[in-house]
Amino acid sequence: MEFLVFAVMVFFLSVLFSMIGLGGAIVYVPIFYWSGFDLLSAIPMGLLLNTVTSASAAVTYLRKGLVQLSVAIPFLIISMIAAPVGAYCTRLVPVDILLGIFSIIMVLIGTQMLLPGKFFFPGNGNQENIRSFPLILAGGSVVGFAGGLLGIGGGSLVMPLLIYMGYAVKTAAATSGLIVLFTSFAGFVAHLGSWQPDMQFVSYITIAALLGAQVGSYLMHTRMQPETLRKMVGLVLWIMALRMIADLFGILSDGNL
């Protein structure tokens, strides 16, 4: 029954995050951690779900011509080189510091999702700044390192960068999803040495992520307004960040929320 509960949760999160080019690891990792998994197990599980969600959604987005390969390919090459460096640093950084970094990133990303036109999103979707190699180089390095260090695929960093470069929201989401596929896989492989998985549990959540991403990518292309979805994700990230900050400062004891 517990496996089924996790599978249902992963399915709906996969639907949501696949719509906006995020794999969801930034939410999966703290959820697994609060559920009793140690951080060195929660991170590879989050990256695995990121990989599966992004791969499943990428099939739809590539078929619909939404992915900008001229940006995605150099970006992911750079980020995949940086991801193992971040993963190695995980063993050198205390858990509390990692969780603190997580909470800060969630607050910033949640704010930019809720206030895209007023905060971190100077780009207007007119494609004027496309093919800026310095931005791709810097962005790929930061995303790869952060993904490996924190167990996130980096989509929450890639998507705002692509919008800053001038891409429309749907194109940014689809391109971000393809990049996340490879950065997540690189980070996942780098974390395998510290992971002792329960294969039955992993199979449940993997299938759920696969199916959820198919539903989400279909809805994003045909039905949903990305602006609405982005605000929903921003709200979720803020809630998660507040809970994590409360845990770090001992405001709430385990299991009280």
Image: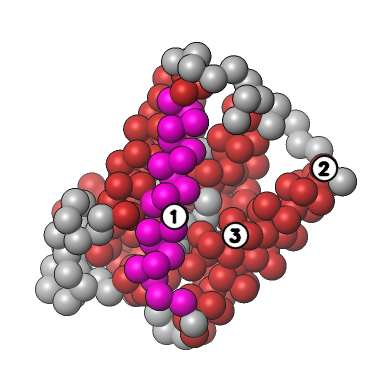
Q: Is 123 covered by the magenta stretch?
A: no
| Number of on-image labels | 3
Q: Which of marks 1 and 2 is nearer the N terminus?
A: 2
Picture residue at 39% right of the left edge, 51% below the top: 234
- Residue 85 appears in which quarter of the rendering? top left
Q: Is residue 7 left or right of residue 39?
A: right
Q: Mark on residue 158?
A: none
Mark drawn on residue 14: 3
Q: Does any portion of residue 66 appear in the rendered image?
A: yes
Residue type marked 1: Val
Question: For the residue marked with disc 2, what is the amino acid?
Answer: Glu
Q: Mark 1 to mark 2: distance in Å?
A: 25 Å
Quick one: label 3 or label 2, which is nearer the N terminus? Answer: 2
**What are the residue bounds of the magenta stretch?**
224-245
Rendered image coloring scheme: secondary structure
Measuring 56% from the left and 79% from the top, which residue is drawn there? 218
